Image (tube, grey):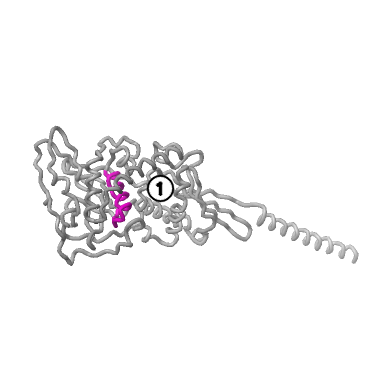
Amino acid sequence: MKDKIINFIMIIFALIIFAGVVFFAWIVYREFFTEDTIESIHTDNNAKITYDESKNETKENQSLSNTISETFGLLEDSKDAVSYPSENSTGNYFYKQLSDTQKKIYDGIQSNKDKLKSGTYAIEYGNAFSDTLSKENGEDTLGYDYQTAIEAFIQDNTDIFYLDPSKMFLNIKKSKKAFSTTYDVEIKPESGKTYLEDGFNSETDVNNAIREVENVRNEVKNKLTGNTYKDIKMIHDYLIDTVDYNEKDDNIGGHSIYGALVEKKCVCEGYAKAFKYLADMAGIDNVLMQGTAINSNSEKRELHAWNAVFLNNKWYLIDTTWDDPIIIGRGIVLNNVHYRYFLKGYTSFYANHTLNPQLTEGGKIFSYPTISATDY
């Protein structure tokens, strides 16, 4: 009887050991040979920042008002005109307002600009955002950081006219194992598609378009004088002399520098981005601005885009779209009409323009330069 009890205990003990070995083997297998993967996509179609159009029309015999003098003198010092460091603007004005995580996302896009021309290249971040994703609501937090980084990148880099950010997705792969969770992050297009703007179907198309844009840039570059005021005026005049406002908004790149500089027709976003692109090339501190403006014909407040430039230690505003009015009939536009919104202070300019520092609903509220109270 005693032997039977001992044998029973040994059997139970052996079963416990066996169960422990099986459990340990399962843990090892789970940890090293399996993964539970969840695909999570974060995007916001508003990442593609577009503007409805607010455009002045000049009709035949229409009264011309609000003109400015053709003589441009130096603005006297004003306590309302606040100096702004030049290093805060050209090229990376919005980048400098980002958090470390947002800068990391922006840097990944920036460092792969050439590869993005394929429309399918995946920007891989690996586990760079694990700290964020491991926290409560981490995916929402990273989604917001991604949206903010995209917005800043679009505002700073008007030369990336061939990308449609609304077609770019932040993909988060979460792998759960027995003792850990890992995250792998990348930006890529939807499966089987590209993130190129409509009208650009391949890297060849993109390269050809870039060459066309750069040819125009070089043409303008040859006209630079090295005098900041003269170069600002030259770029302003070049755009209103060569670009037509496209009321139908139906051409390739009509919201970008491609429409303005190559196709020579665009909407207000194209004018503003082209001005920034050329001003960047000239080394002129400038910022792309957006908000609303009151259409002089319909008196409706509509979305609009314009620019700010840094001249003689002060910031001034320029609206090349409204300085290039649509002519109906045989109307003649006097020269001073083309400068109604050239180097203006906030007192006159914001009489019918309103800056919106939030590019998309729920997005980051960006800061902008302090504009001179008075015109140049």
Q: Quadrant of residue 316?
A: bottom left
Q: How many marks?
A: 1
Q: Position of residue 72 (x, y in %)?
A: 14, 55
Position of residue 137 measured from the top left corner of the image (x, y, whole percent): 47, 58
Location of mark 1 (residue): 44
Look at the image and say whether residue 38 sits in the magenta stretch. Answer: no
Looking at the picture, tell me which residue is in the foreground, 300 or 64. Answer: 64
Which segment is the magenta one?
268-287
Task: Report the residue at 33% width, 62% height from top.
Answer: 87
- Residue 274 in magenta? yes
Q: Nearer the viewer, residue 174 or 58?
A: 58
Residue 44 falls left or right of residue 319? right
**Residue 184 appears left or right of 369:** right
Residue 242 in the image, given as x and y percentages of width and height = 25, 40
Quadrant in which the C terminus appears: bottom left
Q: Which image quarter holds the N terminus?
A: bottom right
